[in-house]
Image (tube, rainbow, N blue to C red):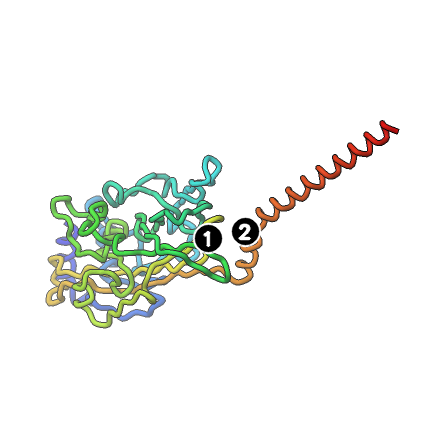
Amino acid sequence: FLLGFIDLIINSNIEEMEISPLYKVTASEILFEGYDDKLLTNLLDVVANNPGIADQIDLPPFDRFGWFYGRNESELYDGNFTIGTGVDALDNLGMMRLWNGLDRTPYYRDECGRVVGSSGELWPPYQEPERPNVTVFSSDICSAMTLEFDGAFSLHGVDGFKWKGNDRPFDNGHNYAETSCQCTAAEEECPVLAPGTMDVSSCKLGAPATVSYPHYYLAHPSYREAVEGMTPSKSDHEFMMALEPTTGIPLAVKAQLQVNLDVKQYGLTIFEGIPNVMLPVLWFRQTAQLTEELASDLKLLLVLPNIGIYVAIALAVVGVVGFAVSLYCSLKVWKD
């Protein structure tokens, strides 16, 4: 109904509305400030003047469009996180329990909809090297990402372990059966997407968006071959995280994702002549790294337990010697 309704509005008002599939806007507008979208504005006006159709059209709660519109300085954009404090068990420290009050999201089936893993900032201590995977919950995709163990890691003299994003998080059930629940279509139609991108349309108010690694790193070659300028590389586009195992403190984080538009005809006149393509829109990187000063503090924290043991042993020896001396003196006085 919505697509037919939109097409009707476009065809009847296309000259007056000056609607085009292409807009020239600034980076600030397309990211955070948003820009006036004539189609969205006209749809909102039509719905406002026709209350009877409001229930049949699911429009976004915005009057402007921007990929991160409303996110800056917002305490609520990423949702409400309920995490474990570690009081019941240290393994639960920093682990997600609820997101927006729910233990699963309505956007994905089965395991893909469960609210699990860490929010990324806080991790339980005593991470074992034998632990093959760690899981991070991301509000950007309304789901959890599983990272695989990638060996030892060292920064400023502090040793830890590294986990990386492999081809599993955006597989869509092609090579990892457990990821088939990423598909948002009817189960008999899945998988719809080739491996390497994940459909996040239901998570993003119905926008035909997908998420992948930057430059389609580790994705099916068809995505890169359909557009120009894609140069994926492990050094530039790998998703990784390193933790100090005893404390669970992050040593380094490089979280990076790419937002893509699933461009199709969609039965709309305005898109005639535009090829079907998974079009990269932007990619972003969030990084954090332990400073040398904090690394020095962390190294001191790691040796404190050993210092405590040595101090305890020394105090015990002093106590035994003191007791022996006291006993000897008492016996000598009694003998005299």
Residue at 20 percent of width and 56 percent of height:
195
The spot of residue 94 in percent (x, y) is: 43, 45
Residue at 45 percent of width and 37 percent of height:
89
In the rendered structure, find residue 244 and report the number of the disc placed on it. 1
- Where residue 25 sits, quadrant-wise, is bottom left
Residue placed farthest to the front in the image?
335
The spot of residue 86 in percent (x, y) is: 47, 39
Q: Element under label 1? A: loop
Q: Element under label 2? A: helix
- Mark 2 — residue? 302
The spot of residue 51 in percent (x, y) is: 23, 46
Query: How far apart in space, not on screen, are marks 1 and 2 (Cα)?
Result: 10 Å
**Marks 1 and 2 in Cβ contact (< 8 Å):** yes
Instruction: Count neighbours of disc 2 (C-alpha within 10 A) and say few if under 14, some if 14 to 19, many if 20 or more.
Output: some
Amino acid found under the numbered disc labelled 2: Leu
Does residue 30 appear in this view? no
Instruction: Count neighbours of disc 1 (C-alpha within 10 A) and say few if under 14, some if 14 to 19, many if 20 or more.
Output: many
204 or 190, which lies in front? 190
7 or 215, which lies in front? 215
- Horizontal placement of 270 versus 312: left or right? left
- Horizontal placement of 186 versus 215: left or right? left
The spot of residue 15 in percent (x, y) is: 16, 67
Residue at 13 percent of width and 53 percent of height:
4
144 versus 38 height, above or below: above
- Horizontal placement of 73 versus 217: left or right? right
Residue placed farthest to the top in the image?
334
Does residue 2 appear in this view? yes
280 or 161, which lies in front? 161
Quadrant of the snapshot with the C terminus:
top right
- Horizontal placement of 264 versus 294: left or right? left
Amino acid found under the numbered disc labelled 1: Glu
